[in-house]
Image (tube, grey):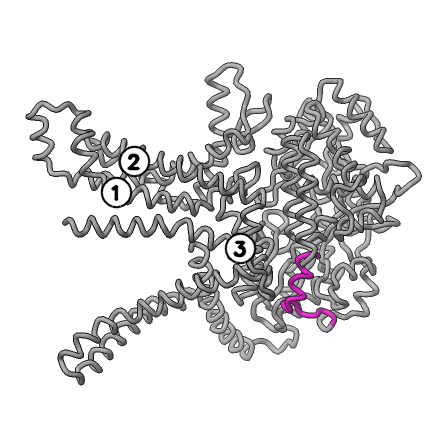
Amino acid sequence: MDRLLFALLVIVAAPAATAFYIVLAERALRVLPERRQRRIRPWLWIGPALLLLTVFLIYPSVHTLVLSFFNADSTRPVGLDNYAYIATDQSMLVALRNNLLWVVLFSGLTVALGLLTAILTDRVPYEGVAKSVIFLPMAISFVAAGVIWRFMYDYRPPGVPQTGTLNAVLTALIPGFEPQAWLINSSVNNLALIVAGVWTWTGFCLVILSAALKGIPSDVIEAARVDGATELQIFRRIILPMMSPTIAVVVTTMIIFALKAFDIVYVMTNGNYDTEVIANRMYKELFNFRNFGRASAIAVLLLGAIAPVMILNISRFRAQEQRR
Amino acid sequence: MAWTRSFTSLRTVAGALALSVVISACGQSAQQQSGGSDASRIGGNVNVLATWGGDEQDSFLAMVKPFEDRTGVRIQYEGTRDLNAVLTTRVQGGNPPDVAGLPGPGQMAELARGGRLIDLSSVVDMASLQADYSQDWIRLGQVDNRLVGIFIKTSLKGQIWHNPAAFNQAGYSIPHTWDETMALSERIAQSGTAPWCIGLESGAASGWPGTDWIENIVLRQSGTDVYDRWYSGQLRWTSPEIQRAWQTWGQIVGNPSMVFGGRQGILATNFGDAGAQLFTTPPRCYLHQQGSFISSFYTKSNPNLQAAQDFDFFMFPPFDQAQASSSIEVAGDLFGMFKDTPQARALMQYLVTPEAQSIWTRRGGAISPNRQVGADAYPDIMTAKAAQTMISASTVRFDASDLMPEGMNNAFMRGLLDYVNDPTRLNEILTSLDRVQADTYSR
């Protein structure tokens, strides 16, 4: 009850304080001459955002970078030891390999399936329903999605009724099919986890790509049809090029998600049986082993991997905005 | 990036929570003043964090109910299976629970050295604690001669469970040595049924039931000296003694006809579900190694089962009849105090009493570390037998994996999963455990 009150207080107080700050700043500005006003005003408006960014993003990032050169409890500098560890430790190498797998398969599948469903649903009368169904998993938290897929992949030894959906269906349909421990067998478990991720994120890609598809002027496509282009030609020569800026943004976003993959792995296998990913490893170093040095080094590695993709994403976005 | 962001947001949340605690604390003092005339009715709240869920949570709540009624203190219980992570987050975020279950002596030592835990010798009556608790139990709660944790519930480990009716009907008899156990296992396997049921799956802690196997084997095969040197990091994993223990377990887990469901079955089956196969007709297995707490899982999946009649246990057998015959492995739930409030003090004082502990033991699934809790405080003769086994044992050792640094424990569990997955990788697994040992104990 007290917490609820406090939450309400925050909801009311934070906007009130912001409004108060703006009014006060504008009042103070009025005493200055017109020219100085114009130069100072942007800084006053952007000030709070800059402050929050510094406190909540820049400071922790720098602090993390500093911690990565210290030992487990941050009492003694150890130079590059933590980085040497994450570059040689067996389970870190497995994690790096798996993240690469996630980047390729997860981003590839979500975008490809999103694009396919966007184009297919565009042509049917029940588009809204179809899109909603595919988008629905987005409403479920990733932890819940992981739990659901654990039930899907559940395994019971042969001879016992199969409770996992996948094994139950396969053993019923294919005579003599041996139930598989999908999350344990190292040849399929990474794929099994990625499929769970794809299920959750395809809807997101679909919605954005579908919006881009709708943005293509219909006269261009009609002109192509009049000129005798086939549907495949229209897709390859018109739709795809016109959607490419959006596709690029979606792909980079998905790559970032793939690099940050955590929830599904944590819930479904906790990185066992060669399914470890970088973010889960970082969680373990931080919360289970309380090795702040190594956890920070992994965080820096992750930041280093994501930053270029992020920069690419932003510059793409800017270029696209300018073209408008 | 994701990390820094979530870390700072944790801090904000923690700050918000800390504030809300201040607000609620103000509310309490008002309540107190208007409270009754009874001096022991202090009112207020205690925030308790522990690992228990389901039946165990119900038992804990039943245990503290008389305390709540008498003192007017409300227990706000929060259960998590990932205690280690939750506790670390909350302690780091400046928002520790008032009282919490500690994941094990290893982590307790880290928390105590970080100055997070309150010295309990000023909280509970030490004279009566010394009288009621064996010195071993008290010592396990001490760090640098300061008492920071007290066991409120314990369990016996390394029990081998069976279904007496099915067992006798098939003409099997209880083995007294490891060799007899293996001979029996082979006999059962030849009859076409798997002798053992094993389940290692346990979410983020998957693999821990295997640590009990290795520990019980090491303790009985090589003795207490090897056991102590091993968990304290002075004996390498690749040493002949430890390697032999893994290979001994490998005779069971590495042989698909020995365990129901084979290797995949072992890895995919939840520890709590594994034993249910003892009670099918015909049984899918005859033996299940697990601690004393497992009986509540049996009765949960099959409510009609009667202890001692439908399921019973014998202790993990010695390797040599003469040697180490009464060494037993135990585990338990340590409680520590993070905030020194009158309510938390009162709760800790209450939890160590035989009155409190016998509430849980009567409900089943627990053994009290308090000597004052008599045989009549156990629900059946089987549990009373387990309690008796624990009290009468000449040598008691605490769960080794709980005594190891968390990084070592985690690698141990993971190594067991890898071993079951592919027993030919034993050397590689033990070598990598040696590396973790060199790394985690040096801190």
The residue beneath circle 1 is A208
Image marks 3 and 1: residues in contact by CB distance under 8 Å: no
Q: In the figure, is residue B94 to the left or right of A218?
A: right
The residue beneath circle 2 is A114
The residue beneath circle 3 is A295
Residue B7 at x, y = what percent?
Answer: 47, 60
Query: Is A66 included in the stretch rendered in magenta?
Result: no
Q: In the figure, is residue A191 to the left or right of B441?
A: left
Q: Element type at marker 2?
A: helix
Q: Which residue type does callout 2 highlight?
A: Gly
Q: Quadrant of the rendered structure where residue A221 is?
A: top left
Label 1 and label 2: CA atoms lie apart by: 9 Å
Q: Quadrant of the rendered structure where residue B88 is?
A: bottom right
User: How many C-alpha atoms fall within 10 Å of the one at disc 1: few (<14), some, or many (≥20)?
Assistant: some
What residue do we see at 24% from left, 79% from top?
Answer: A24
Residues behind callouts 1 and 2 on a single chain: yes
Image marks 1 and 2: residues in contact by CB distance under 8 Å: yes
Please name which of the two marks, 2 or 3, marks the residue nearer to the observer.
3
Label 2 and label 3: CA atoms lie apart by: 34 Å
Q: For the magenta stretch, what is the residue range?
A: B106-121
Q: Element type at marker 1?
A: helix
